[in-house]
Image (cartoon, rainbow, N blue to C red):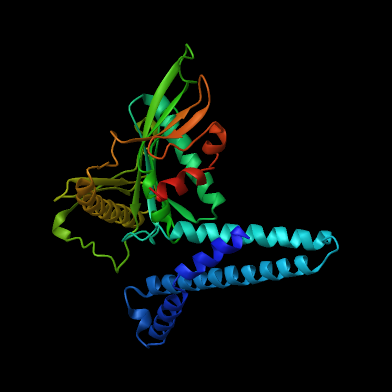
Amino acid sequence: KPLINDSLKLLEELECDKWKTELKNLQTDTLEPTFWHKADAQEIMQEISLLQEQIEQYEKIQSLVDDLKSFEELISSNENEIELDLESEIARSAATLKKLTKDFSVKQYLSGKYDKNSAILSVHSGQGGTEAMDWAEMLQRMYLHYFEKKNWKFDLLSEVRGEEAGIKEASFEIKTPYAYGYLKQERGTHRLVRLSPFNADNLRQTSFALVEVMPVIGSKDSINLNEEDLSWKFTRAGGPGGQAVNKTSSAVELTHIPSSITVKNRSSRSQSQNKENALKILKAKLAMIAEENLQKKIDQEKGKHQHASWGTQIRNYVLHPYQLVKDTRTEVETSDAQGVLDGDLDRFIEAEIKL
């Protein structure tokens, strides 16, 4: 009964009629002869797909609520015991309804300017040499497992391997609606405490890695770059130890002169692909900075502000002398450290979204 009531309350709050009107208008736009010549045609198709999915989920919740109501009436009118197959069907319907209701409830918090966008997530190793690079790769693995659990598509944009182990940095594009809204609170410093496998004395060591999360900027978004503000350098891509791995100048270094932001990309053998990835990351960084500046003004009025930098420690991962992962902002914690490192991040991310 509480599940049905919660679902009915959520359905009242959702604006399904508004979604249907938006969908109809967008579908009408696609019928124009010049539609596919528009710069934002692909984004409009993605918006149509997103609206269709939301409407389908809304109607699915409605249908499941009706089913469970019918089951309730059947149970109350039947004095005999519930048949086993009916009991299983009720349990399945309730579990599906609970999941759909939870997903929609979380999305109600994602109303920021770029929250519906895809995202770029970057991991950077901190000071500490090989140990820190190994920790950065552990974080990379954690996020990739999380994306896989969520069935999110993702592409590697850039990666710089460590000389002995781990990574110096890596960036991924997560190609799913709401990826930025879900992940943006993951940015900040992640701290690891463990017995280092790279220490001859097997001493306990603390390592740090920085996570950045940026929105992928589409043609509708107002991030315009002037060519005169961009400085490009092209070099041969190098491998671990400094050896060249590419005979052509495919590695790209892009600097945005007004902000002094520099993006390096060498993940592809194609210079044009590396240029495209570098531009995508630069636009995402500029959008993130603009959003942070806006949030800073809001937070200053509230008397608080946190910047996604090395000084912003958001989560501790302790593997020795005990196991504990704890978020410093939400106080959410678990002793299942291995589960978290295997991508079980929902409890942390859902709590962050509601901050």
The picture places residue 228, in percent across and down from the top left corner, at 13, 58
State which quadrant residue 306 falls in.
top left
Residue furthest to the right in view is 80
Q: Is residue 64 left or right of residue 301?
A: right
The picture places residue 259, in percent across and down from the top left corner, at 16, 48
Q: Is residue 64 left or right of residue 265?
A: right
- Residue 309 in sight in this render: yes
Name the residue located 45 percent from the left edge and 40 percent from the top edge.
140
Above or below 81: residue 190: above
Q: Is residue 139 left or right of residue 273?
A: right
Above or below 198: residue 242: below
The picture places residue 224, in percent across and down from the top left corner, at 21, 63
State which quadrant residue 336 falls in.
top right
- Residue 130 in sight in this render: no
Q: Is residue 41 left or right of residue 194?
A: left
Choose between 355 and 221: the one closer to the eye.
Answer: 355
The picture places residue 269, in percent across and down from the top left corner, at 39, 50
Residue furthest to the top in view is 201
Name the residue located 46 percent from the left edge and 38 percent from the top edge.
332
